[in-house]
Image: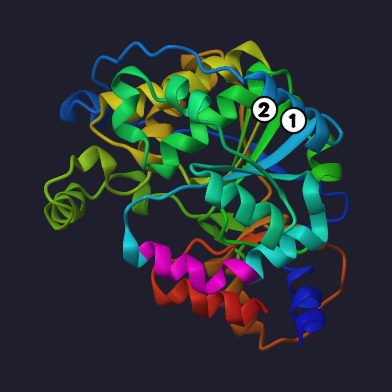
Amino acid sequence: IFRRIISTISTLGVAPGLTGVLGELLFPDYVADWAAQEQCLPEISQEEPVFADQALKDILEKVVDSGVVVFTVFVDTRDREEGRRFARNMDTWMCRVRSVLASSFLAFVDSEKLRKHFESQYGVSAYFSKEWIKEAFKGRGDGERHDSNYWRWVAMESILRAGYSAFYVDTDIMWLGDPRPHLGALPVADFYGSCDTYDAGTGSVRWYQNGSLDMEQLRKESKEHDDESVCCQGFLVPVNAGIVLMRPFPAAIEAVLRFRQRVISGPCWGQAAMQWALFELCGPRGLLRCQLLEPLRFASASPLMQELRRKRGKALQASYQPSLIHLDLDGKMKTSANQFFE
C-alpha cells in the first residue's frame, strides 16, 4: 500500500528534471496598504545576536552533511493537549527520521531528560545547555522560552553564525528520503520556505480569492482568536515555517534576527511574524533572496491526501518521489494523516 501511494505521489504534475524550487517568493500588491492600515509592522525591538557555544559547535561538526545541518526543536510549550497529540505519533516520526538520517539529525531540547530520551530512545543527536538557553533567551526573549517557534529561530541563527546551512523541519514529518542531495542542488538564495497551498490537481498555488483580502472574514477570525490582530489572520504568502532552509549568508543571518524581532515586537508571533519579516526583506524591498521549495518534493499533507483520494490510488507514470511530507494539520487530523501515509 505504501509503495502504491508513493508511486501515485511521484507523478502529480511534476516535470522531469525538477530542481526542487517552485519559484521566487512574491507578495500581492495589496499587502503594503494592509500593513499601513492595520499597523502590522510596528517598530522592532533590538535583540542581541545568538551564537553557538563550543559544545554546540562540536555537535554541528558531527551532524553536518554536505554543509547542511538538519534540525528540529522539541520543548515544553506548556500546552498539554498539543503534547498529547505529538506523543501519540512521535515514535513513528522519529523512527522514520532515524532510518533516513540516523544521528546526523539534530534536536534542540530544553531539558537534560529530553536530551537523553532523544539520544537513547530515538537514536538521533540532541543538544541541551542551560548556559546557551540563558544567552539565547535573555532580555525580552526571556518570555519566549516555552515558544517552539522562537526556539526555531534562535537555533537557526546559532547554526548559520557557525557557518553552516540550516534546514529546519517540524517534528510532525513523514520522512521518505534524504533531502540533502536536493538541497545542495538548489540555486543560490538566502531563504527557502515550503509551500502549503499547492493544488496538486491543477499544479497551481492558491493565493487569496480574486487577489484581494476578505477583511470581513479576517475580522471574524480575529474575534475567534481573542481579538488577535487581523494582521495575524490568514497568510501573506503561501509559505509554511514548518520546513525552512537558510544559507549562512549575511542577509539570511540578519533575516533570522528580524524573525525574532518581529515575534517579540508583535502584533503577531509564529508563522505570521516570519511572513511579515519576509515582506520587509524579500525582493525589491530588501536584499533577501527568497524562494519557495517545490511542494511535491517538500510536501504538505492536506493537498496530497486530497489528490491521492481523488486518484483512488491509481498509479501514474513514475518520475518523482518526495523526500518528506509535512503533516501540518490540527488535532485528530494530524493522527489521521499519519495513519493515511503509513
Asked if residue 290 lies in the magenta stretch, the reply is no
In magenta, the rendered stretch is 82-91
Is the residue 297 above or below the residue 330 in the image? above
**Magenta stretch mostly in which secondary structure?**
helix
Is the residue 141 above or below the residue 244 in the image? above
How far apart, in angstroms, are the residues tagged by discs 1 and 2? 6 Å
Would you identify the image quadrant in which residue 318 lies? bottom right
Q: Amino acid at mark 2?
A: Leu
Query: What percent of the width, then of the height, locates residue 225?
Result: 18, 53
**Circles 1, 2 touching at the beta carbon (< 8 Å):** yes
Residue, disc 2: 56
Q: Nearer the viewer, residue 327 or 11?
A: 327
Q: Nearer the viewer, residue 71 or 179?
A: 71
For the C terminus, the image quarter is bottom right
Q: Amino acid at mark 1?
A: Leu
Is the residue 94 above or below the residue 73 in the image? below
Res. 190 visible in picture: no
Query: What percent of the width, then of the height, locates residue 40?
Result: 24, 28
The label shown at residue 60 is 1
Res. 60 visible in picture: yes
For the N terminus, the image quarter is bottom right
